[in-house]
Image (tube, rainbow, N blue to C red):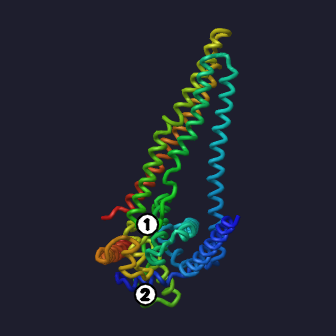
Amino acid sequence: MNGGDELRDLWSSQPPFGNTKGEEIMALVQRKTKRFERMIMIRNWTECLAAAVVTVAFSVLAILTGDALTRTGAVIVAASAAWIIYYISRHGKANLSVDPSQSLTGYTQALLKQYDHQIKLLRSAKYWYLLPMYIGLLVISAGGLLARTRTVGLSWHDLGGPGFYTAIFAAIWWLNEVNTVKRLRKQRDRLLSMTTIS
Amino acid sequence: MIAGAAVEARSTGMESRQRAMFLRLMAEYEPALRRLAAAYAEAATDRDDLFQEIAVAIWQAVPKFRRESSERTWLYRIAHNVSISAAAKLRRIERKEEAMPEWFDHASTASDAEQALLRAEKRRLLIDCIRDLPAVDRQIILLHLEGLSYAEIEEVSGFSETAVATRLSRVREKIRQKIQRKRVSRQ
């Protein structure tokens, strides 16, 4: 079983895998490529639209509100949404595709670099994504709570809003920094162990 | 307007060349690419997905092919690189070491049907052993099994011919030992 030729015989004696027509494969490939491009386009548009909605909504709030603290918070949130889109477009899509026609070493290095970049981006999401918007919302809440203190007084119900968005932000933080980073690290380690030359 | 039409005609020409080259490559290499996918992914759906991923990568790479290397080595380089990154993403399913069937060592007394089963079992074992190899070794042995010369393997993997020869003999030995261990575990 250790002879190269016997291994080769065994290998080439595999029953023919698939007999798909070239045209069918090409149709499938084109479908997949188009679907992928459409998915990326939809994702980009969704991101931009969401950011635009947040920016417009909080800009309107900043204009309409009479409270200085609420206005400050609204301006922070509006600016944060625009900042997030800028940051993602500037840093998020770097090295999206790695040329697979290079040598294994070059390809592995490029993939590792890509993993590191994604991990770094996700680990820092709390600073560039969550924190600015969270601070803005906290300032808005502080404005609202202070206004209520002056008029009807505070109750436990008033903490519902801040509690709700804090939970949402905590969930986003967990998904990014704990869950996704853990998955990416595992993939990175697996790639490294697969390609390490002994 | 004329410039626009010229650009359109050129892009149509490029696309038809891309189509022609892709179809030719698939006609020639589909079985080899599917065998390669099987050496990286165990489940049938994963193998199919991987083959499709390789096909997509080849389709996208065709317009950038500059004939700096042979078509065959260029294609295998893409296929292996895509397979490696896909294998890193796949959740590794721990397989229990399976004992070899009783008839594995008794080929001489086996009937034709048993012979066929024996050969299929040996093949399965070989593929299992290849799947367990590190990517570099896996790449080298697969290219060798697909009939590439040492020079072509050098072109794909980036290792010198001497290094390829050394690694290949070590990989063969590894496979032999693995098969041996499976036999021992049965006894």
Residue ID for mark 2: B107
A50 to B62, vertically: above or below = above
Gap in Å between the C-alphas at discs 2 and 1?
44 Å
Q: Position of residue A191 (x, y in %)?
A: 42, 59
Q: What's the residue at 64%, 13% (across, down)?
A: A147
A93 to A125, vertically: above or below = below
Q: Which quadrant, please, contains the C terminus of chain A?
A: bottom left
Q: Quadrant of residue A140?
A: top right
Chain holding disc 1: A
Labelled disc at residue A102: 1
Front one among B117 and A83: A83
Tags 2 and 1 both on a single chain: no
In the image, taking residue A142 as reference, residue B130 lies left or right, namely left
Element under disc 2: helix
What amino acid is found at the position of numbered circle 2 in the picture? Ala
Chain holding disc 2: B
Q: Position of residue A47 (x, y in %)?
A: 62, 43
Q: Nearer the viewer, mark 2 or mark 1?
A: 1
